[in-house]
Amino acid sequence: MSLLNQGDQIAEFVVADLIKKGTYAESYQVVDKNGAPCFLKLMSLAKMQPNQIDENGNNIEIEVCRGLSHPNLCAYITDGEVILNGQKYVYLVNQFEASATLHDYVASNGAIELDVAKDIICEVLEGLKYLHSQKIPVIHNEITLQNVLINAEGVIKLIDFGNSRFLSQGVARQLMNEDNLFYLAPERLNGVFSVQSDLYSVGVMLYKLIYNQLPYYFDMSLFDAAFQLTALQRVREQPVKLPPVQVAGMDELFAQLLRKALACDPEQRFQSAEEFIQALEGGMASEENEDALTTEESESPELEDEEQRGNGFADIAGMEEVKTLLTKKVINLLKDPEKAQKYKLSIPNGILLYGPPGCGKTIWAQRISEEAGYRYIYVKASDVLRFYMQGQHNVIASLLKQAQKLAPVTICFDELEQLFSNQDTQYTYAIEAGNEFLELLRECASNKIFVVAVTSRPDLLDFTVRKPELLEQMIYIPMPDKDSRRSLFETQLNERPVAQDINLDQLADMTHNYIINDIAFVVNDAALAASETDSEITQSLLEETIKKKKPSMSEDILKAFESYRDMIENKNDNGGNTSNRPHIGFR
């Protein structure tokens, strides 16, 4: 039963018909005092998700919509509050459009001709270009066929800003369902949003219009609910495949455009709506050396070692306790194997670095390699798993065989929890890869290969990998301390126009519990504000941004990591029993 009935009145608007009923909102067609049709969205404050309310208690959707005016958006009219049945509601009124959603349009017409699809997408991108170019960019966060209207004249309107956010705001976790899940960019599954995440959703929409199917689609019901997002993330690590369907006007250049739009890495996508529009209008040059998204996969991954670029621990300010621990436990043994043999000390096969995301664990891995005088290789578990998913075997054996040719070498093995999950719903190919990793890890030290495994989810990690002959040492990488934060500000401000009043110590004091990306955001936001008046970046600009920017890591998550660290350091892991481990639930 709906809250309002035909003829009921909200302010000057009279209800004509119920359009849609959702979990926290109901949408109605209403008419104003002049009889003009309008669209009214009535939202229950009690049922809203925390991410829909800003730090001042205001509804973000309403804050975003105020003042927006563009031909590809439904014009904002007004908003307000109302009490119904003893509860408080807010309402948003926009111009009404006699239109169908693109979802209904495709359901009725099937796949859309390529030229028509291009025109539709260009109009969607014009709307996004306007949103993204606001003084504080607006990210829509839910571009789907259901949230785009098309009228009889073919005019396109973006609707439903229920998950939108200003780019300056923190992560945006939203209620996900199978209708919108496949439209979300990979990073959106973790709450991260950007201009590029909106553009990824447009790429999904373009694919859907042309082929009448979603890219990377699979039957989610085949997987337990707890593992569905992981399954989607892993499928997307493969190159996007175009269906074997003849599409008039489709050529390799347009196929390349689709692959670019749907790149897993945000940096490989279109970087702006304008760039995307230009590509659709024929401005995308062919790339002779296509990246991994546009080429066939090789039979096994190839390792490339990186040249020594840094000065080891000297390049990390502060964090002295971690440096001392790593030097005693690892570096001294790797640098002086003769002394280790003299005292009958075993050269370690590897260590595990764990801690909150964004604290530079992979940077520490590279600095460990530099301190030891080893070459350095970076590998993501998800990249390796992709080959096992395709039915290949002995992939890790092949990687370590390649590494032997580069020895002495450090391999940073990121996302280790994907190989050694303690969850019951682990894939067969992950188990195969994990078993192979364990078998070959025992031989690393004898081949002058040192593995630095990395995880931000130690609570998901199976105890098997921590056997003494494998990854005995677990080293906690904490949040950047004051000296590190001071150094991060110094690095980020380097070569930018800064005022003389910059106080790095004060900035470091104000950013307790800030991760690397948080500090980068603070400096970039202040630089953006300074650029508007062509002035220097001042201390006050930086402090103002800090006051608005909350740390990405909540106190609850940090406490969970500290509890886990205490449990490990006290050797109280109950023989690998995971039931008593602190849960670190940020994914």
Image (cartoon, rainbow, N blue to C red):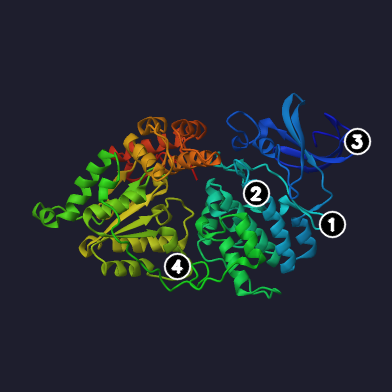
Is 562 drawn above or below residue 247 in the view shown? above
Specify whether 531 is left or right of 301: right
Which is more N-terminal, label 3 or label 1? 3
The residue pinned by badge 4 equals: 387
Separation of disc 2 and disc 3 at Cα?
33 Å
Which is more N-terminal, label 4 or label 3? 3
Separation of disc 3 and disc 4 at Cα?
64 Å
Secondary-structure class at tag 3: loop
- Find residue 321 and report its image quarter: top left
Of 210 and 6, nearer the camera is 210
Asked if residue 551 can be seen in this view, the reply is yes
The residue pinned by badge 1 equals: 152
Dot label at residue 34? 3
The residue pinned by badge 2 equals: 142
- Marks 4 and 1: which is nearer the front? 1
Local packing at callout 4 (Cα closer than 10 Å; few below 14, some 14-19, many 20+) is: many
Separation of disc 4 and disc 2 at Cα?
31 Å
